[in-house]
Image (cartoon, grey):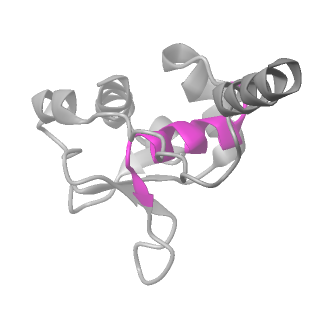
Amino acid sequence: YKLHQMLEETDEKGDSCTSIVSWLPDGLHFKVHDSNAFMGQIVPQYFKQKSYKSFLRQLHIYGFKRILKGHLQGAFHHPKFIKGNRQLTHDIDRIKAPVPRKNARPSMETSTVSFAKSHDEWFD
């Protein structure tokens, strides 16, 4: 929601801001044109992030994809992030962390249970 608001407000301010970050003409993508100016002038008004990397991490956590090739290279996209439809952003959710694999690492519970069984065997 804040990201949408930021892009709307930078559009209203004109070239001084849209040269830093803007919607692309299709209204389905946005692009940061100058990451240093973006972090120094625009982000502090809307977000808590202190580094561009943190900002990118947040976009990723909410499912935004960065376009890597073609004429939209460097732009960001989310199917529920559309210019002129701020209400739709309420349907954007954080991506849940992946469920750990079963045999990745034994948990403390497993270790404790194993230890308890070993302890019982020693003192029966």
From the top left corner, tell me how far across and down residue 38 is, in percent. Answer: 61, 37
Residue 27 vertical placement versus 38 (above, below): below
Residue 12: in magenta span: no
User: What residue lies at 48% left-to-right and 18% top-to-bottom?
Assistant: 46
Residue 87 vertical placement versus 74 (above, below): above
User: What residue lies at 56% left-to-right and 54% top-to-bottom?
Assistant: 33
Q: Quadrant of the C terminus?
A: top right
Q: Quadrant of the N terminus?
A: top left
Which quadrant holds residue 52? top right
Residue 64 vertical placement versus 106 (above, below): below
Residue lying furthest front: 124
- Magenta residues span 50-65
User: What residue lies at 47% left-to-right and 45% top-to-bottom?
Assistant: 99
From the top left corner, tell me how far across and down residue 68 is, in percent. Answer: 51, 75
Q: Is residue 72 left or right of 50 when viewed as pictured?
A: left
Q: Which of these two is toward me, 103 or 116?
A: 116
From the top left corner, tell me how far across and down residue 15 is, in percent. Answer: 44, 43
From the top left corner, tell me how far across and down residue 78 is, in percent. Answer: 29, 52
User: What residue lies at 60% left-to-right and 17% top-to-bottom?
Assistant: 48
